[in-house]
Structure formats: C-alpha cells, structure tokens
Amino acid sequence: MALTPRALWLVLLGIVPVVLRPAASTVWLWLLLCAVVVAVDVLLAPRPRSLHLERELPASVRLGESVRTSLFVTNPGSRSVRGLLRDAWPPSAGAELTRHTLRLPGGERTRLTTLLTPTRRGDRQADRVTLRLRGPLGVAARQASVEVPGRLRVLHAFPSRRHIPSRLAVLRQLDGRAAMRTRGQGTEFDSLRDYVEGDDVRSIDWRATARRRDLVVRTWQPEQHRRIIIVLDTSRTSAGRIDDSPRLDSGMDAALFLTAIAGHARDRIHVIAGDREVRAHVSGHDRVGVLHDAISELAPVDARLIEADWRLLAAEVARVGTQRALVVLITPLESSALEEGLLPVLPALAARHRVVVASVADPAVDRMRRGRDSATDVYAAAAAERTVGLRQRTAGAFRSLGVEVLDETPDRLPLALVDHYLALKRQGLL
Amino acid sequence: MTVVARWRRTGLWALAILLGIGALAAIAIATTPPGNAMDPEDMGPRGGAALVAVLEQNGVDVETFTSIDDVRDALAERDDDTTVVVANTSNLGTAAATTLRQESLGVDRVVVLSPSTGQLRALRADATALPIGAGVRVESQCDIGTVDEGDSMVEIDARYEPGSSASGAKECFPLTIPDADGGDGAGDHGAGLLDLPSTSGHPPITVIGTTVGFTNGAITQEHNAAIALRLLGGSPRLLWYQPDVTDLADSADDTEDGALLPPWFAPALALVAFSLIVLALVRGRRLGRLVREPLPVVVRAVETTESRGRLYRRAQDRPRAATVLRLATLDRLRSRLGLRRGDSVETVTRAISAATGRPVSEVLDLVAGPPPTDDAALVRLAQDLSDLEEKAHRP
C-alpha cells in the first residue's frame, strides 16, 4: 500500500475540529478517522495484479541509437483504474520517462511507451513493472511490482562499417568484377576467354591460343573458401580503456569489419572470443548470417579481470580444422601477459596457420613519449619509451616466429587489419 | 577534488562552527545565571555574604536554600520563631511562590526583595509592583518598628502600591516627586517598603523594592544595614531562600503560555507533527525497487605506464630514465639511418654525426655519456635527444 498527498491534506484538515474542540483527544480521534478512511480506500482500491501486462520490445538495438519499448496494459475488470505505472530499467539502458500515469476504464487496453537510449554494449534486462492503483477516494493506493520480462540486446556500434564500401571496391577489383574492367589479380585459375584490346599481354595463354588459333587469355580469381579465424582476447588486458572505450570494443570493431569484408570475399569465418573459457564462437559462410551472428553474439561479451588461457584458445582454433587458415589474434601487446601466455603456444599455431596479431595501441603513450617540458614529463616519457620498447620486444619475438604484428590506434586498427587481409588475398598467400 | 567531497568538507566546517558556537553559548549560560545578586556565599559586591555573617554574629541561625522543596521541608519541620527571606526574586516562579505562601503561614515574617506583581499575586499580597528602573535614595517617613522615622535607604528600584483589599498595610519610603513649590508630593506614587499584616491567606509579609540594597557592595550605605538586620534578625531562625532556575520553570507552563497562546495551539501543533510523519510516508514509499546493474571495470590502459613514470620519479632513478631515453633514440635513429640492430654505438654515432653535421664527440656524449646528476640535467638531456632526432629526420 502507499499513501497519496491527499492523505496528508486529510490529516491537516484535522485543524478544523481541533480549533472547534481544543483537546488532545480530538487529535487522536481525527487520526483514527484518517486511519479508517485510508484503510477503507486501500480495501476498495483495485488489485494491481488483476491487470494484464504485455511487453513489446525489439530484440536488439545498435549502441548510440534509440528504441521504444511498449507496455500494453489491459484492464479485464469492469471498474475504472487510476494510478501510476513505472517501467524500471537499469541505468545504462538510458530509459527516459519511466513513470506513466494510468487511467484505464474497465475492459479497455492502453499502450505506454518508454524510450530507451542505451549507453553501454550488452544485454539489458527489464526490471519489474510497478503499479500503484489509487482507491476511489484517492487517499491511498495499492502497490505491487510484477515481472514483465524483456531483454534488449545492445549491439556494438561498429563504427568502421562506414569503411565497408571502399574496401568492397578493392575486393571487386581483385575479383575482376570492378567497373574498371581490370583483370582479376588473384592466383586461382578461373577461366579462359577471348583476348580483347586492353588486356594484359602477359596473361595470354599461349597453349590455348595455339589450339584455338585465336588469342585467348586466362582470367584469375582470388582465392575463395579460405578459413579466417578471428580470436578475440577478453582477458584483463582488454579491459583497459583508451579514450573511455575498452580495448575490447576497438578489437571487436576490427573483428566485425574483417568479418564483413571476408564474408563478401566468400571466405569461411570463425570468430572466437574467450579468456579462460570460450565465451563465444560464431562460424558460417553465409556472409550476411555470420556478420549478424557475430554482432549479436559478441554484444554481451565484456572483458573480465582474469588472465587469458592461450592454450585453451589455441585448442579451440585447432578444433576448427586442420586446413591452413588465417588466424587473427586480437589482443593487446602487453609483454608480460603475452610472453608468458601466448608465446609458448604461438610456434605450433604459426607452423600450421598464417598468424596475425592485431593490437590496439594507446595514443596516450605516444603523447607521453614526447613530453620534454619538466622533470615529471621526462620521467613519464622514459616510462612511455620503456612501454614502447617492451611492446617492440614482444612484437619482435612474434615476428621472428613468422607472425605478422599490427599495432595501431583504435581508429586505424580495423583498416590496417582489413588492408593486410586484402594484401594477403592479392598475393594469394591465404 | 570532486564537487561532492568539496560540499562534504564545507558541511563539516559549518558543523564544527555551529558546534563551537553552541558550546560557547552553553558555557555562557551555565556560568552567568541571570540575577545572581544576594548569593549568601558570594563575597563579591553583588553577594550577600556580609549580611549573613553579621546576622550569625548576632545569634541568628541562618539556613540557606535554593529549592522550594527544601524550604517546604524545613518549614514542615518547624515554622515558629522563623523568618523567611526571598533574597532574590528573579527566579521565583509563581508555583514556587504559591508553595511558599502555603507553607509559611505560621512564620513570624516573610521578607521579599523586589517581587513582581505576579509573584505578589501568588503570595496573595494585594499590591502592585511598579519598577523604577534605577536605584534611588528615599527617606522612610514612617515608624513601624523595623523602620524608624528618619531612616533612609539607597538602591530602592521598585515601588509598591497596596490594593484596596489590603487593610492595615503600612507604607514606608514613599516615592516623592518634588512639587513646583518645593514641597513633597508624597503618597501618590507608591512606597519602597510595604508591610502587610498576616491574613488567613498569608503570613506577615514585608516587601522591599530593592534588588541590590542589601548586597555586600551597598549594605554599608545610609541605614541599609540597620533596616536589613531589623527585618531579617527579628527571629532566632532565618530561612534564606535563594531560588534557582528550576523553581522558575515550575511556573512557566500554567501561567505564561496559557495566557499568551490559544488553547488549540498545542493540539494543532501535535497534528502538524503527525502530518509530517504522514508526509514522510507519502514521499518515502518508492515506486518499485532500485534497479541494480553490474558495471564493467573501468581501467585506463595508460595507467601502468603512468605508474611506471611516477615510480621512476619517486625513486629519482635518473640513470635508468636516461638509459631508456637514449636507447629509444638510438633505436629510432638506427632504423632511420638504415643501420642494423647489432651495429655498435660508435658506428651509429658516426652515422648520426654525418647525418646531423654535429661533432662525433658531442653526439657520443649525448647518446652514451655519463648519466645526468640532477633533474634539470635530465630534462636537458631529453630535449637534446629529441632535437638530435629531429635534425636527423630533417637535416
């Protein structure tokens, strides 16, 4: 039960009898009267649980966008219902106006809409819906909270998706399908066709020409149906924030971008996220499906404050298959963590697959490195140089194993990774 | 410092100041009670110790009390051959005065110094008090045994007019206002001393309109001492009643407030208090529970590097900082000048010297010299190294 402001005015109205009959007993009698009125009003108030509640909610929303959730309230009884309804959401769901006034005649149904603008990636569960229904006098109300389940998946903002068209154009050039009609430059034999003016004379297939007595050229197509395995490290080192965004989110951006481009190139993609356990494993070769699945599956994955178990992640990579694949390890180049965890398993991995380590670099370290103004700055610069030196040492150790290392700032890493992939594809090194 | 912390600190200061003021006020109230004149143990100019001492020398048994309950007990024990004096009436509540009147019916005399009209009414003495506002000197102009014709008193600060029902009241020390022709306009303006005979309701009461006339400071002037001794030394036993504040409190409720405030005020106040509770209930009921949310960890990636910098600074580790900076510069210049990692410092130095046009010895001192001895030298070294790099990049 709950009291309304009217209950307060009712008590204060007792001033009138108190003035007329100034005695302590008047006060007690008036309070008793108020208590009786409140009790009667509560008893006559409609039961909140008698209302029927239904939620309408989109399954997911991209971070930074808004979405509306609706509650359909049905009043199955014959009496009119007045009161308040609160549709509670966690703070990071960014709910606006969660309190609604409810005025519902008997047998009718209404729709109450709450605008959600989530501020963080992940799953947001709706909390209870609280109903406070007033009695006929409006002095008191019955209150109850009911579960109306609802889950909103807040997807990664995927900011690098604006680069997809430009990289797809590059891919079409490789494919020979580009508008410029340049020759496909892949290494996989596609077909023979008649020579047309403008074709590269180096691609003339003389043997076929001799048979046909007409100039015939070979066309090439880029490799297809290669395996791309993207491993996202969700351990403690990925929790570090660069400009208020965790490294994991930047790494995820790169992973999604690569998934989108590689999907268009008809490669088979596996996205694995994990630390001491595999948190997500998305695979498929349907390019739209796998990107959608990856965005959805990775949405609730957050960095955890534990060390990564690279042996486990390497085993997960091995489970995908023995076919040679491009393995992209997205992990920060933290020398201590990687030299103990990743370095022991890397030789075996590098021997079987082509391995790329993609790391999110912190521009702040670079800024610190250039500080020369005061003793404090110089000590910080020395520390930054030390950090950079350690990263280079780790990168050097990786490179000596034949592993490519990309260490780029958050906004550059997705492009660098995809460009590296396209370069490999162009050279037929996948 | 965050805004919250700043507000909290301001709040703490305000609280400390308030507590300090409160403590000072409490000390002030506790140490200087109002109207402490005629304290029988006070030797100062406002005390009454001199009078008590002289009375005891003359064989009067002086008993002092500060509470009306103790006075009542003393009177219940014995009330013949006794005089009661209320030496200071500023704390005499009407309830205490009524008790005193009821309990002292059998005593020889009750002497009251400078009572108010309300206190006189509580004593059932039909007289009106009219404060003068200053202590004046007055001639007695009467002969009533305790006061002789020709006596004079100083520090008379209140005058009294007997009411119509006060039969047999004797007035002394009449307040006079000189007439235009120089004669005395006696009788019309009340008297400094009023002697009321006993009635069924009260014992003989002598009212004197002086607060400080019998104090140590003033008793030696004029005939004040003689009058005091005659008034208080009339019986072998004297109960000296010096009411304290608790006796004042007895009267506060039933007279003052009751007279000033309407009767419904107290119940209305109670009702408002209850309505505040109702307000708390109205506002305090949440519309549903608070929603909890597990939050992600917030760690800045650059934190470890910054901490390492602080560590260097706290340890004043100039050699290490210098070594790290030199190695980093050498590494970058090596790759810039197309040298291999394994090349010796001398080779690199010569290449740098050639690229920048600076003498070999100077470059060697910069990249492999002794570590700096103070922070200023370290800053200089760091700046020189970055200058060298810039020069090598843009000769």
Image: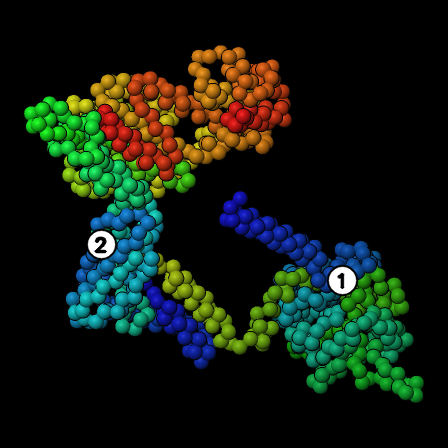
A122 shown above or below B132: above
Q: Position of residue A88 (x, y in %)?
A: 30, 55
Measuring from the top left, give residue A284's x and y in whole percent.
16, 35
Q: Quadrant of residue A314?
A: top left
Kind of element beneath mark 1: loop
Pick the residue in front: A54 or A48: A54
Amino acid type of disc 2? Leu
- Total numbered circles: 2
Comparing A99 with B125, the one in front is A99
Picture quadrant where residue A400 is located? top left
Q: Residue tagged by mark 1?
A: B37
Q: Is residue B1 above or below residue A225?
A: below
Please report the residue visible at 39 percent of the width from the left and 34 percent of the height from the top. Answer: A409
Give the percent coordinates (x, y) of residue A85.
Answer: 28, 62
Q: Are marks 2 and 1 on the same chain?
A: no
Q: Would residue A368 be seen by someone viewing this image from the given angle?
A: yes
Query: What is the spatial separation of the Cα atoms under label 2 and label 1, in whole angstroms?
Result: 84 Å
Name the foreground residue: A83 vs A9: A83
Q: Residue furthest bottom?
A: B181
Residue occupying image coordinates x 23% and y 59%: A71
Is residue B312 shown above or below A304?
Answer: above
Residue B104 falls in image quadrant: bottom right
Q: Where does residue B335 sit, x and y in percent of width and height?
A: 44, 21
Parent chain of label 2? A
x 35%, y 40%: residue:
B296
At x 88%, y 73%, the residue is B151
Compared across the picture, whether A95 is left or right of B311 comes to left
Q: Quickly name the residue at label 2.
A: A57
Which residue sits furthest left?
Answer: A211
Q: Can residue A143 be seen from the camera position used here?
A: no
Above or below — where is A368 with respect to B92? above
Q: Identify residue type, mark 1.
A: Ala
